[in-house]
């Protein structure tokens, strides 16, 4: 005969899994209900990097006369692939900030957040369930991006050291969604997403070397860049895809990414718990 506590724990885990599945399925139904979103997923991967690619083409000078200087700073003369890697990862982060930042806010605007908050489940399961659907759409976005760049620009991102690319991607998953969890918690606190998205994504855009090598930044900006996880992910993916670097060559960066992969989800859970506690104490869930 099983102990009552073990049976209760099993039912508790089962209920959390049901919450994850239910929220993920609900978000997927909403996504399918408005299929025009697929047009954005098709257009943005090509449209956004073109701005920087055309600028880089103009700045490269006649017949690419300044490319040797770029190659010395960036480690490659393939500036198109260099820009594409940075912008793709930045767009993934940008999508996560919008999706997870607006998830709880949209639930609030729809009038369903308070009723969901009354369910006898771990509240963070609601956020994690939504993130499963967001992950599926993000994987669709990344897959279409790789396909489009290969067909239209001849840029093949899935090349070089494939196992290392997969490892970096797996490390980035908890990092990206840890940031999204923190962000979603702050949006409920301040009731505003637009300005916060612009601020956070702007910081990553300026400091992480999205479209230019970090070597061109002043020392104080490089110091900030090395405190942001996206810096290491972009640098390592460029090394693995463009230079076929091995794990040993990027081992220090991988260790930092592993630390971020533990730290940021932990901070996200703590921030969400604090926000939930404050919302219960002040009754702000119903305030718009």
Image: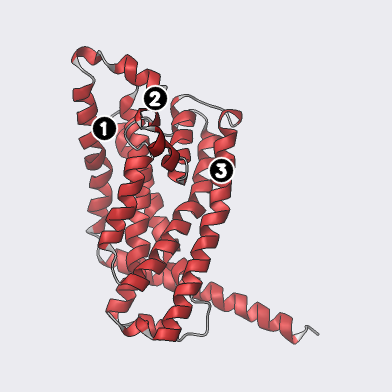
Give the mark, 2 or 1, whose residue is nearer the N terminus: 2
Q: Quadrant of residue 47?
A: top left
Q: CA distance from mark 3 to mark 1?
A: 34 Å
- On the question of residue 144 being in view, the answer is no
Mark 1 nearby-residue class (10 Å; few <14, some 14–19, many ≥20): few
Question: Toward the viewer: 202 or 45?
Answer: 202
Q: Residue 159 in the image: x percent, y percent?
A: 45, 30
Is disc 3 placed on a helix, strand or loop? Answer: helix
Is disc 1 placed on a helix, strand or loop? Answer: helix
Q: Residue 187 in the image: x percent, y percent?
A: 35, 68
Q: Residue 250 in the image: x percent, y percent?
A: 55, 32
What residue did someone put label 2 on? 74
Mark 3 nearby-residue class (10 Å; few <14, some 14–19, many ≥20): some
**Colour approach in the figure:** secondary structure
In this rendering, the label closer to the viewer, 2 or 1: 2
Q: Residue 202 in the image: x percent, y percent?
A: 30, 48
Q: CA distance from mark 3 to mark 2?
A: 21 Å
| Extreme-front residue of the structure | 220
Is disc 2 placed on a helix, strand or loop? Answer: helix
Q: Quadrant of residue 193?
A: bottom left
In this rendering, the label closer to the viewer, 3 or 1: 3
What residue did someone put label 3 on? 256
Q: Is residue 54 left or right of residue 247?
A: left
Vertical placement of residue 116 versus 192, above or below = below
Q: Quadrant of residue 211?
A: top left
Mark 2 nearby-residue class (10 Å; few <14, some 14–19, many ≥20): some
């Amino acid at each position: 005969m099983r102990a009552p506590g073990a049976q209760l724990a099993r039912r508790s885990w089962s209920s959390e899994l049901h919450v994850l599945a239910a929220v993920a399925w609900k978000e997927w139904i909403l996504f399918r209900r408005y299929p025009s979103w697929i047009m954005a997923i098709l257009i943005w991967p090509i449209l956004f990097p073109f701005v920087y690619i055309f600028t880089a083409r103009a700045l490269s000078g006649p017949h690419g006369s300044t490319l040797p200087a770029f190659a010395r700073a960036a480690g490659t003369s393939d500036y198109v692939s260099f820009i594409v890697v940075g912008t793709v990862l930045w767009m993934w982060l940008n999508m996560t900030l919008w999706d997870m930042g607006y998830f709880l806010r949209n639930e609030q605007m729809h009038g369903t957040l308070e009723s969901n908050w009354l369910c006898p489940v771990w509240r963070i399961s609601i956020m994690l369930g939504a993130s499963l659907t967001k992950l599926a759409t993000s994987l669709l976005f990344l897959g279409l991006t790789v396909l489009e760049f290969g067909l239209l620009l001849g840029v093949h991102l899935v090349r070089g050291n494939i196992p290392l690319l997969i490892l970096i991607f797996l490390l980035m998953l908890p990092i990206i969604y840890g940031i999204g969890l923190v962000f979603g918690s702050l949006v409920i606190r301040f009731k505003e997403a637009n300005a916060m998205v612009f601020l956070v994504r702007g910081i990553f855009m300026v400091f992480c070397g999205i479209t230019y090598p970090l070597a061109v930044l002043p020392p104080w900006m490089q110091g900030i860049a090395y405190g942001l996880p996206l810096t290491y992910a972009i640098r390592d993916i460029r090394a693995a895809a463009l230079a076929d670097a091995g794990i040993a060559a990027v081992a220090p960066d991988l260790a930092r990414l592993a630390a971020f992969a533990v730290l940021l989800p932990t901070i996200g859970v703590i921030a969400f718990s604090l926000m939930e506690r404050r919302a219960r104490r002040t009754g702000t869930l119903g305030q718009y």
